[in-house]
Image (cartoon, rainbow, N blue to C red):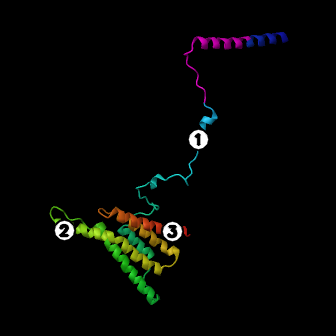
Amino acid sequence: MHTAKMKVATLLAVGFLGAVGLGVVFAAEHPNAPTIAVAPTQDDDKPDPETDPKTTPDPKWAKGSTPTAFPEIPAITSKSLTDFEQKHIEPIFVGDPPLRKLLKMKLQRAVQKLADALDYVENTKEPDSATNPIAFSNFHDKRLRLCTSLPSLMIEAQTIAFELYPTAESRRPWLVLKVAVGKRVELIRHAPRDEAQAARLDAEIELARHDQKK
């Protein structure tokens, strides 16, 4: 039995060496024969190193662009301003002291001026330039004038609101409204683009500083 096992082992060894020998001979006689691809090692599969967000330039804020830091804040509309008034402007109460009553009245008038300007910019129909060129020209002059007045009207309302509402929580909606007004001005055709962008950026910086204090 032991002798039979030794013979089998010897035959296997001889067969293996013969196969190796044939392989060597084949490679020598056929140097252009296709080779078998070798699987990559683990080092080749290493992922690219992760970039550090603190030192990686943000393509959205590339030079020449003016993105927003608050994309969730939409440009103001007449409807959103009406909703804002109902939510954030208090009525004048009987028990209010005289100064508070006066400030509330002044704030209501300031916001109304803002609403009137916004309504004209949004909803006034443009006259036909062919049939009424003078009215067409006057319309665009007034529209541009009201458009450029929106930021100053907003600042007037904000100043009064900050005197009425001294807490950080009650002031934030007015800062958000200011950003929304700035975005609306940027959308208006023929508005001074650089001035509109500068006003909106100032409004966003003011809101960002407010939020950073929390």
Q: Name the image quarter holding residue 90.
A: bottom left
Cα–Cα span, label 2 and label 3: 44 Å
The segment highlighted magenta reads 14-39
Cα–Cα span, label 2 and label 1: 65 Å
Q: Name the image quarter holding residue 20.
A: top right
Q: Earlier in the sequence, mark 2 or mark 3?
A: 2
Residue 38 location (% of width, % of height): 60, 26
Cα–Cα span, label 3 and label 1: 39 Å
Decide if residue 180 is in sight here.
Answer: yes
| Residue 101 on the magenta span | no
Q: Residue at x 60, y 36 (%)?
A: 45
According to the picture, the residue beneath numbered tag 2 turns out to be 135
Given residues 105 and 142, the one toward you in this image is: 142
According to the picture, the residue beneath numbered tag 1 turns out to be 47
Q: Main secondary structure of the magenta part?
A: helix
Q: Residue at x 57, y 15 (%)?
A: 31
